[in-house]
């Protein structure tokens, strides 16, 4: 057996925004390629011009830039097997269409769409195959002269693959094992159309996988029904020994588990099914994306890696290097993977929590600027460091940190009712005096001094501390109180205490 370098490809059709399931397919290709020291190729399958959507190809490029999944060969990067856009490979496909015709493995058919429609209404479950082809208008039922005359007169035609009935077709799938199909169940699929001089998906896909020396075809389960035809095409082109290994990945299912995950599920349950935001160029309708919804690319990758594969351990957080090392088709599941947006949020939460404070602060700075808050990156870094383990999205940072940058404008009523007692103003005044005299304003020193003072005066720790927090934050939330005061500084702490006493003096939670 020859040893080929592993080469895999991601082969999207630019018919709209890439579905998140397509991103998972690309990721598995990437992981496998990197693990095997192989090549990861992007091929744009755009032979169906009727389904072309402007912007879709750029969208694909932007998605992988964002995720940091780099292609070794692609329309943009080039490579030895280019061009990587099928619409630019017309002449290549024509040679192979001719080869199939010459070998008698394919034939020319002239049936008009109307004629085919009539057949379909006449015959239930009509299939264009060995049992019907001699009753149709094609180069097998017509004489050579008739066929040539029709072509010369400019009659449009298609080329169909000639499937011999009663043969066993074997698809070896790395996930599903050996799948056998009887060729009688297949129809004579159209592989080429004279009207646009382009092959259909099936032929272009097989020819390119061969010419691009693809060793493994890793794609979504929806392509499994096409695999027997592709195997047949390999045989007809006499390429059997170069046939790639197949791996058909399980579907991504609705969160409830019944049926394929759709855009409607995303709309219905409020989560994106696309990696990036997408505006439909025809309708102007915008669909949300993971990027715009505040997901980190690393979190999306980790989340997708586990939708259809598992490491066999309890580990859930994986770096890219770990995924590359551990990924295997042995651990890819055969059954569909239920989409769980709560899990996606959990991963994002974990990744934000792991992020260096500096990087997180840099993502947060523009939000602060928009709110016309000027704060040094150093302060922002400390603030996000204190709360990063509490958020799921960058967009939640402001709500969790606003009190570091601005004094409370109001005091949460419920907290006031519960925490501000008749003796609180007196305690807060004394606390103010204590703080004013502290020589060291570090969180540790503040804490020690305040706790000693509470103990000495036999005050109720909870009463004092809760009221203190209310004065500083405006509510009963936030990280360790002395971390907050240390960061906002002594002056600001004193100002907030005084302001709380003045505005809440008359309040007494008891009535
Ligand atoms: N163009 C097909 C798609 O859009 C590719 C299927 C395959 O990977 O063979 O999914």
Image (tube, rainbow, N blue to C red):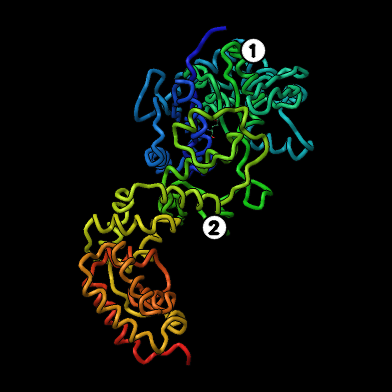
Residue 228 visible in the current orientation: yes
Return the x and y of residue 45 as percentages of the image width and height. 48, 31
- Residue 306, above or below 484: above
The quadrant in which residue 264 appears is bottom right
Query: Between residues 111 and 267, which one lies in front from this camera angle?
Result: 267
Position of the N terminus, as image quadrant, is top right
Q: CA distance from mark 2 to mark 1?
A: 50 Å
Query: Between residues 109 and 283, which one lies in front from this camera angle?
Result: 283
Return the x and y of residue 130 as percentages of the image width and height. 75, 21
Q: Residues within 10 Å of mark 2 (few under 14, many from 20)?
A: few
Horizontal arrangement in the rendering, residue 56 relative to residue 385 (left or right): right
The quadrant in which residue 44 appears is top left
Horizontal arrangement in the rendering, residue 410 relative to residue 305 (left or right): left
Query: Between residues 65 and 357, which one lies in front from this camera angle?
Result: 357
Residue at far front of view: 456
- Residue 323, above or below 375: above
The quadrant in which residue 453 appears is bottom left
Please give the residue where the numbered disc 1 appears in the rendered image: 104
Q: Is mark 2 within 8 Å of ligand 1?
A: no
The disc, 2 or 1, on the residue closer to the chain's N-terminal end is 1
Q: Is mark 1 within 8 Å of ligand 1?
A: no
Q: Residue at x 45, y 50 (%)?
A: 290
Please give the residue where the numbered disc 2 appears in the rendered image: 267
Q: Residue at x 29, y 74 (%)?
A: 407
Tell me the quadrant of ligand 1: top right
Q: Residue at x 30, y 69 (%)?
A: 449
Q: Residues within 10 Å of mark 1 (few under 14, many from 20)?
A: few
Return the x and y of residue 13 as percentages of the image width and height. 49, 36
Q: Which mark is residue 47?
A: none
Horizontal arrangement in the rendering, residue 376 relative to residue 221 (left or right): left
Tell us which disc is closer to us: 2 or 1: 2
């Amino acid at each position: 057996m020859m040893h080929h370098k592993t080469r895999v490809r991601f082969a999207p059709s630019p018919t709209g925004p890439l579905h998140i399931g397509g991103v998972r397919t690309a990721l598995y290709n990437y992981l496998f390629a990197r693990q095997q020291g192989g090549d990861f190729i992007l091929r744009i399958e755009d032979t169906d011009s009727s389904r072309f959507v402007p912007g879709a190809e750029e969208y694909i490029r932007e998605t992988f830039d964002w995720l940091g999944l780099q292609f070794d060969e692609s329309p943009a990067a080039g490579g030895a097997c280019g061009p990587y856009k099928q619409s630019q490979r017309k002449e290549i496909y024509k040679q192979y269409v001719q080869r199939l015709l010459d070998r008698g493995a394919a034939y020319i058919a002239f049936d008009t769409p109307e004629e085919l429609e009539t057949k379909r209404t006449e015959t239930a479950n009509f299939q264009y195959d060995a049992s019907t082809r001699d009753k149709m208008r094609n180069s097998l039922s017509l004489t050579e002269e008739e066929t040539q005359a029709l072509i010369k007169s400019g009659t449009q035609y298609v080329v169909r693959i000639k499937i011999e009935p009663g043969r066993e077709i074997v698809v070896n799938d790395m996930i599903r094992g050996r799948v056998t199909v009887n060729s009688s169940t297949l129809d004579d699929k159209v592989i080429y159309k004279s009207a646009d001089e382009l092959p259909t998906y099936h032929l272009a896909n097989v020819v390119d996988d061969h010419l691009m020396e693809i060793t493994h075809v890793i794609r979504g389960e929806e392509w499994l029904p096409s695999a027997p035809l592709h195997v047949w095409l390999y045989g007809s082109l006499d390429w059997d020994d170069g046939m790639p290994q197949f791996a058909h990945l399980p579907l991504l299912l609705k969160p409830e588990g019944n049926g394929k995950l759709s855009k409607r599920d995303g709309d219905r349950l409020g989560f994106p099914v696309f990696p990036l935001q997408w505006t439909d160029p025809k309708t102007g309708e915008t669909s949300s994306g993971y990027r715009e919804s505040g997901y980190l690319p690393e979190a999306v990758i980790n989340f997708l890696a586990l939708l259809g594969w598992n490491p066999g351990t309890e580990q859930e957080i994986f770096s890219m290097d770990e995924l590359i090392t551990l990924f295997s088709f042995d651990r890819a599941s055969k059954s569909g993977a239920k989409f769980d947006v709560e899990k996606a949020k959990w991963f994002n939460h974990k990744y934000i929590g792991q992020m260096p404070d500096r990087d997180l602060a840099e993502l947060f700075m523009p939000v602060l600027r928009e709110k016309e808050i000027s704060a040094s990156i150093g302060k922002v870094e400390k603030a996000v460091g204190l709360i990063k383990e509490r958020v799921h999205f960058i967009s939640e940072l402001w709500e969790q940190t606003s009190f570091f940058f601005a004094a409370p404008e109001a005091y949460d009523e419920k907290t006031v009712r519960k925490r501000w007692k008749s003796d609180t103003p007196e305690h807060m005044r004394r606390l103010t005096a204590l703080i004013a005299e502290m020589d060291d304003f570090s969180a540790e020193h503040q804490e020690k001094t305040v706790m000693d003072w509470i103990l000495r005066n036999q005050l109720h720790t909870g009463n004092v501390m809760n009221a203190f927090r209310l004065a500083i934050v405006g509510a009963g939330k936030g990280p360790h109180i002395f971390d907050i005061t240390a960061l906002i500084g002594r002056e600001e702490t004193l100002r907030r205490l005084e302001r709380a006493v003045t505005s809440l003096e008359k309040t007494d939670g008891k009535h």
